[in-house]
Image (spheres, grey):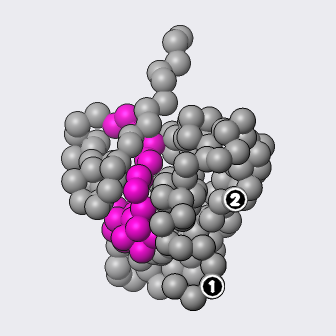
Amino acid sequence: MEGGAPAAAEKPVMIVGLDDSDHSFYALEWTLDHFLKPTAPNSPFKLVVIHSKPTPTSAIGFAGPGAADVYPFVDTDLKKIAARVVERAKELCHSKSVDDVIVEVVEGDARNVLCEAVDRHHATMLVVGSHGYGAIKRAVLGSVSDYVTHHAHCTVMIVKKPKTKH
């Protein structure tokens, strides 16, 4: 290799998949607390946070009269949500003294986006939050965590947010 440290010295990559839910931010916070503590300055992982931004077409979910009129508004909203997710992720990482983080927004279905990111970054681990959907809702919406567990070419960790007691 020309210049720089040999590839063997590079830290393994840990990817955290993030949407705008409390479940995924809990997973990011849990990961920061358990794997990237500032008390352990020689953290074993390089952190990459990936937010999958849905396409306006998939978010609208219909094509027909009026769809083209709604498209620009939906696209603007999706961009605002993505910007908020990125900002909140950076703030959370910074609050935990983890500033060596890459945050990416990739347009597409979260299942494909995360699996492709694993391959692109040669990730060792993928972390996702669990929304805790029941079987019917999961069957209809399609579970991202279920999909990546079977298709990502790395270890997958699903972080569940503890249920709050009433």
Please tell me which residue lies in front, 30 or 66: 30
Which mark, by number, is residue 3?
Answer: 1
Q: Position of residue 77 (x, y in %)?
A: 61, 68
Q: Position of residue 82 (x, y in %)?
A: 61, 65
User: From the viewer's perspective, is 11 left or right of 114?
Assistant: right
Q: Is residue 19 visible?
A: no
Q: Residue at x 22, y 39 (%)?
A: 136
Magenta-highlighted residues: 109-133
What's the amino acid at mark 2?
Asp
From this view, report whether residue 22 is shown above or below residue 75. above
**Quarter-wise, where is residue 86 in the image?**
bottom right
Nearer the N terminus, badge 2 or badge 1? 1
What distance separates the C-alpha of mark 2 from that of mark 1?
A: 21 Å
Instruction: Name the secondary structure under disc 2.
Output: loop
Q: Position of residue 39 (x, y in %)?
A: 72, 36
- Residue 124 among those drawn in magenta: yes
From this view, report whether residue 43 is shown above or below residue 77. above
Q: Are marks 2 and 1 in contact (CB under 8 Å)?
A: no
